[in-house]
Image: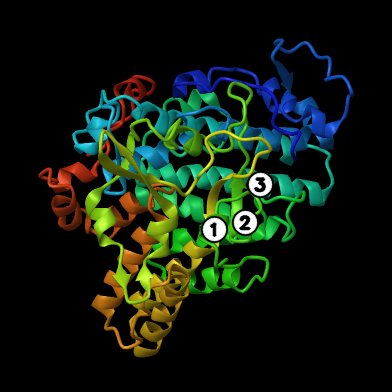
Amino acid sequence: MKSVFKNKWKLPTSVNKIKTMKVKFIPLYIIATSVSLLSCEKFLEVDSPKNQVAAETAFQDEKIANATVIGMYTSMNGFNSQFGSGLLSTLLSIAADDYLYAAGSYDAFKDNALLSSTSFLDRLWSQPYAHIGQANKVIEGVENSTLSTSVKAQLIGEAKFVRAFCYFYLVNTFNKVPLVKDTDVFKNNLLPQSSKQEVYDFITQDLVDAVANLTDPYVGTERVRPNKKAAQALLARVYLYTQKWELAETTSSAVIADTRYKIPTDLNSVFLKTSEEAIWQLQTVNTSTAGVNTWEGFSIVPTSATVNPLYRVYQKTLDAFESTVLGTDKRKVNWTKEQPFNGVPYSYPSKYKVRTSTPVAEYNTVLRLAEQYLIRAEARANIGTAAKLSVAVDDLNVLRARAGVTLLSNTLNKADALLAVEKERHFELFGEWGHRWFDLVRTNRAVAVLSVTKGNGFTASDMLIPIHDEIMKTNPNLKPND
């Protein structure tokens, strides 16, 4: 897929702009981004607007239908500071206690003083909905096409996976969101918010469908298009978040049992594009900045060894990593890096180590095996029997062994096991895809933890992320996040 992602494009900035077409068209950038993968054939010549081709025509061609699906992933990782290219990870890491940004742009997140006018909030809403709109176009176009049954299943499975993925982040960020299920723009522009349970039910069904439709082998030689196990991995997370402990345990176990996925002993290999731990990755799409591997690496890694590192791991988080007779937690050693400035040492996140380089070595890792061990451990701990508590600790110890710290006792009680899960999730997943923020909010631990670790008077109301004013203007039926 190295030649798939070539064309630069611009993401819509409001829901209104996403859904203004009266006729169903497929944006041409979705197709153009994949033209080198497909062939040198001419694009369809139709009477559609110049930058679009009619969906009814596009989805009759298997190559172009595949290109529209690839375009969904292109759109998620094409520019810096977008929802899928590191922005969500950055904002929620700062809102929690993973790391901060020292140059002021994200102070409202650092201080947990978010307003409906706070910059960047609009992107966390409008951009996932843009991807959902693309997924809906794919689903409808493929369902109404004459493509083969197997091709239809794969493409619809991928589109439902992407739709579920985006709704997962929308509902966990904003609690109640409209459920846009089709391409009827007039109806969708006036949809009220659905309850969190309704959204989760929809996500679950999309992922169950994706598991049934997707093939187990990856499409292509890399892990940049989701397969059956990627859908199961996300479904396991959804079961965990909705407290379906047994389903979370069995679904994560199915992923863990797949021998393609491994917990490598070298922590510096986890975020490489060749990582054996990766379940689903996003390949960086870039024409604007030479040598970008991931936008997170490009943003966080200092431009030289003498400049001020602006992304800094919270000191209390650094201090929380364990140092035992076996040594300091290797996750701290390998996934943070210290750089002095004016005689003061600052530690910055270093999971992605490449700012720019050619050839590309790192991909944006979205789903990985370590999370499945953590999901299973938490599910087992919540089931709470002595036998389940013992194997929950075993799961945590898989990651602790790799980190080089003392293994936990298999005799932990339920409360201590759940606290151990919380800590391991922080050490293992810090800085990744909002995990720390979502974990503290969903377990009602945010006030207890962040009021201490951040020392900024964090209260229960700070767990609510407001919907941006510009988003509220797009739909008269939207209500603020209460």
The disc at residue 224 is 3
Determine which of the numbered discs, if any, sits on residue 275 in the image.
2
The crowding category of the residue bearing disc 2, from other C-alpha atoms within 10 Å (few below 14, some 14 to 19, many at least 20), is many
Label 3 or label 1, whichever comes before in sequence order: 3
Q: Nearer the viewer, residue 468 or 200?
A: 468
- In which quarter of the view is residue 102 placed? top left
Q: In which quarter of the image is the C terminus?
A: top left
Q: Is mark 3 on a helix, strand or loop?
A: loop
Q: In this view, does 468 lie to the left or right of 144?
A: left
Q: Which mark is residue 368?
A: 1
Circles 3 and 1: CB atoms closer than 8 Å: no
Q: Please, what is the three-letter code of the amino acid marked with disc 3?
A: Val
- What is the C-alpha distance between the residues marked 3 and 1? 12 Å
- At which x and y percent is residue 298? 50, 33
- Name the outermost residue toward the left: 457
Residue at 30%, 67% in the rendered image: 322
**Image x and y of residue 177, in percent:** 38, 39
**CA separation, marks 2 and 3?**
12 Å
Q: Is mark 1 on a helix, strand or loop?
A: strand
Residue 164, numbered circle: none
Name which residue lies at 66% across and 59% down: 228
Sequence-first disc among 2 and 3: 3
Q: How far apart, in angstroms, are the residues tagged by discs 2 and 1?
A: 9 Å
Q: Do the residues labelled 2 and 1 touch (CB within 8 Å)?
A: yes
Please state which of the two labelled residues, at mark 2 or mark 3, is closer to the viewer: 2
Does the CB distance between marks 2 and 3 fall below 8 Å?
no
Q: Is residue 241 visible?
A: no
Q: Earlier in the sequence, mark 2 or mark 1?
A: 2
